[in-house]
Image (tube, rainbow, N blue to C red):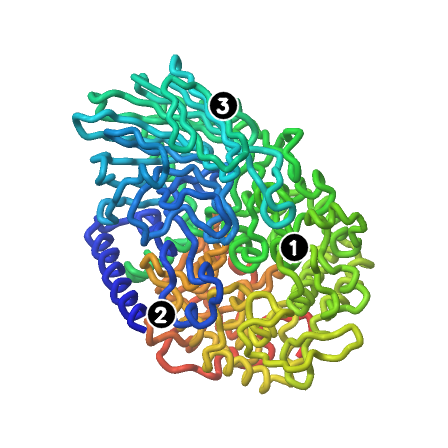
Amino acid sequence: MFFNSCLRKLSACICLGFLLIFQNSYAQKLPVQYVETRIGTAPAATESAAKHSEAGSELKGQTMPAVGTPHGMTQWTPQTKSTETKCIAPYYYADTHFQGFRGTHWLNGSCVQDYGTLTVMPISGELIVNPEKRASGFRHETEIATPAYYSVKLDDYNITAEVTSLSRTAMLRFSYGEGKDNFIVIEPNSDEGEGFVEIFPERGEVVGYNPVHKIYQGAGQSAGFSGYFVLKFDTPFTQYGVWEDDLISPMGRTKMGKGKREKLGAYVGFGTNQKSVIVQIGTSFTSLEGARNNLKKEQLGKSFDAIRRSTENEWSTALGKMKVKGSEKDKILFYSALYRTKLSPRLYSDVDGQYPSFAGGTPLQKADGFDYYCDYSMWDTFRGSMPLLALLEPKKSGDMMQSLVKKGEQGGWMPIFPIWNSYTAAMIGDHVMSVMADAYVKNVRNFDVESGYKLLRKNAFDTNSDPKSYEAGKGRRALTSYLKYNYVPLEDSVWQAFHKREQVSRTLEYAYDDFCLFILAEELGHSEDAALLRKRAFNYQNVIDPVTGYARGRYADGSWIKNFDPFSKRSSFITEGSPAQYTWFVPQDIAGLKKAVGGEKSFVDKLDTLFEKGYYWHGNEPNHQISYLYAYARQPWKTQKWVRNIIREEYDITPGGLSGNEDGGQMSAWLVFSMAGLYPVTPGTPFYVLGTPVFEETSLEFSHGKKFKIKANGVSDQAIYIQSAKLNGKPYTKTYLSHDDLTKGGDLVLEMGVKPNENWGNSASDAPPSLSKD
């Protein structure tokens, strides 16, 4: 209790400091100027996070102050942790020592691993290469952290370190003090000891690579490609060399790891008189030549300040697709969240379109007419982050769909959770079905949907009979059981997956995924498939116990597991949560779920229990749609109550301002949608359920020139309840909007009040659509 109290006081001070900084800036600010990139770099201080988290990493946002373009190939971050180990982010706010700038491929807010990275560290005085020993103390007061630029004063060396970045390249600027030898240390961060560096002093260049390895399926095995880097210096070297562990080899030009987990790298020196050094860095996943070509094409003739301005402009354009009117603090909260939704998936293709083959790395492929992306935190982001991208940036969404199609074609199966350009079965579900159906029904057309459908159909109908490739992550987990019983029974332990067992959660998610494929089949005219998949979308009913009204483990003979507590924090048949939380994951058929749990009154009573007794856990994604479900039960005012409560209780603008792992942008996507006043409860359908806007006005600005405005007259933290609504000037009582409503342009005007209007939106015909009818 004492620790939590102190942390809350510290967070309040930090929050006030951030507000003062922004309020003292000039009046008219661009969206990018509201972004605080360090939110989520400290443990959450919320009560729900402490109550529901088990692993220590679940308490952390796991974000980083990333510098780069939206969805860029390589982001740049200050490094305070020197490993690529699972669940260790490159930067934590509580750390006090800076180890260098890392060119990172960390999946933002995750508990996976970084890979293919390098770190660049300036030092002055004695040459020290070990990352912990060479690290300099720094103070947060000297940090400037924006999406396009990061700067910090290294107190131990009297050096100012700065970085700015484009999609595939970066520029670093180091300003040294006087009177000491100045160096830059370069380290490929290979935990396996397989990195490589080479120095070309005659042309002021250092090159190298860091081989990528897998975790989950095939843990420790090569992913078949590397992170390549080329560094060019604007200042001649006065000395140089290579190093391994603490052994320094002056005048050495090359160093290759022996795979014994040794640390290695290069260093270059500039003497005592050089005051400033600029380093240009190109990165690639294909080759050193790819990295060199990326550097040439992106940075030719550009200065540090020009690159910074270019990246700021790119962020302003991306963030400016949503413009809001409200308090300065809420703008910081909102635009910082929108920024975090745009860090993954990441660009993988070079400027010439080349990228490593999916699931093996070779041969190199060519992206023709699209950009190739990877690092999809699919179990998380299908819910809100990917639908947000489809809404705001349909062209980029289509490129990401085409990237998924290419992965399936190159590997033979549509991937489930594709990261580090490889198959994994890291999480449950088969959610490419969701994101592809969602993109298609929202008029994203710049991808080969028929080829995508064939691959998705294979995942849904064909069991992978090859043990080796199944073990590697190809094919839907437990499909044989699911097709036989129409649920995954407890006897199937699902051993060939990172998340084992979790049979009820798998059943619920497969039923939803089958619904999404049904939607896509129907859209494409595959009527026989559509009929079968529609039937399978009701399989959720097979794991909702009619006696208790909760999701419950079930055996192959149809009997239910004994000793059942729906509010147990963890159950072996549930993924990262309780049965009471997972019961609500039936987004395709909330009307049918109401019947399954005992009728509308029981449905509402169970929702009330979840929220009022503290069983709701916002820090994990399966809960994210739950607060919006009252709209399906003729009580939308309770959605308005709990959505606003979550916004204020689970998020803030301090480093501890996320109540759980960011998970590729999903925690923030929920916030972006919810602060605007709507949420896509059922991705794969073109509908958004209304909540309660935080802002007086939110304007969605689309690439075809149309705008849709959500105006909330009289809104405040007390006036959170919708009293009445007008859509394009006409009275409106429905509790949802369609995608066409938004993209055709117009406005939704809400009159807000401090007391619920229980008569607004309370007709069955006002509820959002469901697969079943009430």
Q: Which residue is mark 3?
A: 293
Of the residues shown, which amino acid type is indicated by label 3? Asn
Of the residues shown, which amino acid type is indicated by label 1? Ala
Q: Which residue is mark 2?
A: 713
Measured as percent of width and height from the top left, residue 184 is found at 33, 28
Q: Is residue 439 left or right of residue 267?
A: right
The mark that comes first in sequence, 1 or 3, is 3
Q: CA distance from mark 1 to mark 3?
A: 36 Å
The mark that comes first in sequence, 2 or 3, is 3
Residue under the point 39% across and 22% down = 249
Q: Which residue is mark 1?
A: 437
Measured as percent of width and height from the top left, residue 223 is found at 61, 38
Please indicate, yes or no, whether residue 305 appears anywhere in the rendered image.
no
Residue under the point 23% across and 29% down = 125
Is 260 placed above or below 496 here?
above
Quadrant in the picture for residue 3:
bottom left
Label 1: few (<14), some (14–19) or many (≥20) C-alpha neighbours in 10 Å: many
Which of the two discs, 2 and 1, sits closer to the camera? 1
The mark that comes first in sequence, 2 or 1, is 1
Is 145 placed above or below 499 here?
above
Which of the two discs, 2 and 3, sits closer to the camera? 3
Of the residues shown, which amino acid type is indicated by label 2? Asn
